[in-house]
Image (tube, helix red, strand yellow):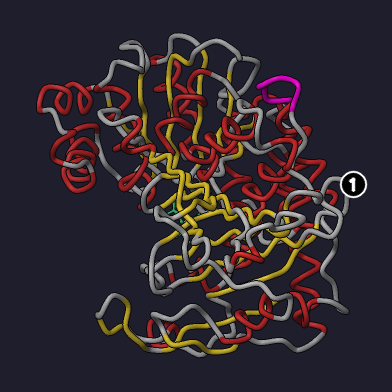
Amino acid sequence: MTGGAGALLLFGATGDLAKRMLLPSLFALHAEGLIAPNVAIIGTARSALDDAAYRAIAATALDTHVPADRMDATARATFLDRLHYVPLDASDPAGFAALGDRVGAARNGDLAIFLSTAPQLFEPTIAGLAAAGLTGDNVRIGLEKPLGTDLASSRHINDAVASVFPEQRTFRIDHYLGKETVQNLLALRFANLMFEPLWNAGGIEHVQITVSETVGLEGRIDYFDGSGSLRDMVQNHMLQLLSLVAMEPPAHFDARAVRDEKVKVLRSLRRIDRDTAPSHTVIGQYTKGAVGGVPVPGYVDELGKPSTTETFVALKAHVDNWRWKGVPFYLRTGKRLPTRQSEIIIQFRPVPHSMFAERGSRLHQNKLIIRLQPEEEISLMVMAKEPGLDRDGIRLREVPLDLSLTTAFAGQRRRIAYERLLLDLIEGDPTLFVRRDEVEAQWEWVDAIRDGWTANGMTPKSYPAGTWGPSAAIALTERDGVSWHD
Ligand code: BG6
């Protein structure tokens, strides 16, 4: 940790992320007194606004995105008062001097910068910050995705950042790491004795990670069509989840120890290449259908032009190390699927011998379900005997041992992932941010898959909106005798 920041400088301050997530998160932190009163919050973007006009935009964002039961009129007013705005065209170096002056005057301590801008503005912004003196030992920078579209472009951006900000002051955001249940995965694995002895190829048969969304393009036409689900979701969020499931126990809960273990997993991922892409991956694109009973258009209709971008991807991965030898990790994500559901399923192996078989009872293998969304809950499916005299045989049933975080910690507010990450950025704790070597290992793996798709001429198979992707995604697991947990 470094010293707490005396100012937060927000690039992309009028953008969609700022309105939906960053301003509501900062408001929540402010309302709870978690951001010291002397920390100035300065927004910057291209629009020619003054402080008052920016505060009006922020007020609308809060009124739209902060739930009514969390709104507090006094906190709203004091929060808006602490917002400042400096218009800046980041592609024009001339504007940075004025920004430097404003930030210099407002700042009293470290400076935390949050960059949520179009990727092409990263480099000019970094250069402008350096020219305006907004760099140095007590300045750190948070970077929002997309950080490139492949390994080469990601390296390019990372090099530009590294020329001014050393790695320990570069905070790459993957908002999944700010989610409470994701951190709970660490507590579950490393604060309990009973899971770890079984947490390996001896005890676990396979792992499933599903992040399904009901939304479509959400107006992010240019970005998403140039990205696709593999780069938008798998390269970052899903590989981070996988690495937290698969990593060795870190010796310390700190940035270096945790990230050292994650990167080892990412580097152990078996390459899916030209030979294996067709058998290990499935891509899909939604056509018109209905989600939750509401008719929705197909992807190309939303987009308004033909496209071969995937809105769904399912794949079978392996972590080639001693712990995970032969254990498949099935990953699946997509847009316009039937439900919004993010979960990790740990499927344990069967008991070596069942004495209940001869008494007419079939056992289900234990399963641990870690649900991130829509509710945060963890269930361990175990076998239990149904009450009765068992005169017709013993009846066993699978029942959940539930840890509903909403119930167990009732009364404690569920936070937006960005609250945690913004606070960590302001306070200078990089543990929940992604290190450069992790990002590059992620890209390397994803690039090989995309190369495999191109080399094999693979294009997305269609699936009607509101279904679980192309039927080939079901076949991907069924071939191994595994069903997706829907
Ligand atoms: C973002 C992706 O990183 O994550 C979006 O760009 C996706 O396409 C979003 O919708 C999902 O985040 P969450 O927190 O809603 O699961």
Q: Which residue is mark 1?
A: 322
- On the question of residue 120 being in view, the answer is no
Which picture quadrant has residue 140?
top right
Determine the residue positioned at 80% across, 51% down.
201
Which x, y percent locates residue 446?
A: 74, 63
What range is drawn magenta here?
250-256
**Amino acid found under the numbered disc labelled 1:** Trp
Q: Residue furthest left?
A: 73
Is 378 left, or right, of 481 in this rendering? left
Q: Quadrant of the N terminus?
A: top right
For label 1, the SS is: loop
The chief SS type of the magenta part is loop
Which x, y percent locates residue 103?
A: 43, 22
- Compared with 361, 180 (above or below) is above
Is 84 left, or right, of 109 in this rendering? left
Q: Residue furthest front?
A: 391
- Compared with 16, 111 (above or below) is above
Nearest to the observer: residue 123 or residue 63 = 63
Is 379 left, or right, of 236 in this rendering? left
Determine the residue positioned at 17% across, 45% down.
60
